[in-house]
Image (spheres, rainbow, N blue to C red):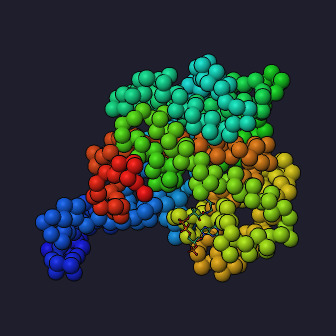
Amino acid sequence: MASDTLTVIDNRTGRKYDVVIHDGAINATDLRQIRVSEDDLLGLVSYDPGFMNTASCQSKITYVDGDRGILRYRGYPIEQLAEKGTYLETAYLILYGELPTKSQLGDWTYNITHHSILHENIKKFIDGFHHDAHPMGMLVSAVAALSTFYTDAKDIFNAESRQRQIYRLISKMPTLAGFAYRHSIGMPNAYPDNDLSYTGNFLNMLFKMTELKYKPHPVLEKALDILFILHADHEQNCSTNAMRSVGSSHVDPYSAVAAAAAALYGPLHGGANEAVLKMLMEIGSKDKVPDFIKRVKSGQGRLMGFGHRVYKNYDPRAKIIKEIADKVFEVKGRNSLLDIALELERIALEDDYFIKRKLYPNVDFYSGLIYQSIGFPLDMFPVLFAIPRTSGWVAQWEEMLLDPDQKLARPRQIYKGADTRDYVPVEKRR
Ligand code: ACO
């Protein structure tokens, strides 16, 4: 018998099974052979709501070790990429597996820069939203709408077509976000400026006023670029799982990105940074922190920006973000909510409730404070997450499409509903 196997004895029947272990995993479909009787057509299934212990794919993109607080893209530690890299080269690395050479980076930057313009009809589409529409809602809808403009995107098994959509998606997400923001504040759109960097241009599309040429502040531009690097991918998180799952139906990538962005919108995922700021404002002052912690511990709400499904020691992104925050505050002045955040962190990190549950500040705990200091309104925070995560989504989507093991995502269920029964006419129902 090979040693890389798992021997299972089904005590219901006394039968013994050997299941192969490969890469530290068993194949869940191998459990199907474990049946109580010939009529048991389904066989044994594994029950795993929220995918707590289920690998849905093999991936070469991002490595996360939650216990040791490690995050690497294609083997490169996040700390090195944040210190030495740029968002665009990180996006290239995530997609193609290697850091680009000088000429590859030049071509990549050119292509991303030159796909940023949106069809003018998208403006009309965004104009249709109510003045107080949430920018993330507008972004989700507008990116889905892009699929109707690029019908070649349906050709998902054509490498050239996929490449074109990847350029477009990474390039147009900031423009869509800019249009959504300007719509919400009633300002005319600022068009992309090809002379600026990816993040510099994004700041231009948000904040350009009447000046002929927008000049991003280098410290803020760099801070945003680092934040984009930190948010570029995070293996099989909720939105990436949505991207892969929806993409597994072979829909075009714009529709799949819309689904991923919708997943990111939720307060337990990418909406958490917005929720953190709301929480800090609600607490209002440092002296109210102990009372707030008491309420969280008694089950009245959560400490937003704390806890992570994977990181049970510390979130390496949170550490880097704290350092960027200081640089941004030097330029923009100290964010008044920082004292409340620091006090929350101090008390929570000493408290048994949080220690026992391994709850530490996550990427969202401090990112919102930086975004607010740069000048972004709260409802733009999840948008600021969706823009850089697009490179991760499309990389994971392409990896999924080219993986021969992948199939239409379709989980099983354990049916607990009524047994078969006869239809009751309406007049006889009680
Ligand atoms: N505040 C207070 N208690 C918490 C928190 C929190 N932020 N997070 C988890 N807990 C408690 C739960 O109540 C639970 O306690 P119990 O065992 O007494 O019932 C225990 O810790 C485990 O919580 P789960 O929800 O089972 O853990 P899970 O791994 O599913 O949750 C999650 C991870 C969703 C991120 C959670 O920690 C949370 O809600 N955090 C706040 C929202 C947030 O910051 N999300 C951003 C995550 S990072 C990202 O998506 C980019």
Residue at x 59% of width, y 51% of height: 266
Task: Confirm whether residue 87 shows in the render.
Answer: no
Residue 346 falls left or right of residue 157: right
Q: How many marks?
A: 0
Name the quadrant containing residue 119: top right
* Observer-nearest of 60 and 404: 404
From the top left corner, tell me how far across and down residue 306 is, in percent: 65, 65
* Observer-nearest of 331 and 275: 275
Residue at x 53% of width, y 28% of height: 145
Residue 154 falls left or right of residue 32: right
From the top left corner, tell me how far across and down residue 1 is, in percent: 14, 74
From the top left corner, tell me how far across and down residue 256 is, in percent: 46, 39
* Observer-nearest of 81 and 29: 29
Task: Confirm whether residue 105 shows in the render.
Answer: yes
Quadrant hosting ligand 1 = bottom right
Q: Is residue 4 above or below residue 255?
A: below
Q: Is residue 425 above or below residue 2?
A: above
Residue at x 60% of width, y 47% of height: 265
Point out the residue furthest to the front here. Answer: 427
From the top left corner, tell me how far across and down residue 293 is, in percent: 74, 72
Q: Is residue 276 above or below residue 128?
A: below
Quarter of the image containing the C terminus? bottom left
Point out the residue furthest to the top here. Answer: 120
Name the quadrant containing residue 170: top right
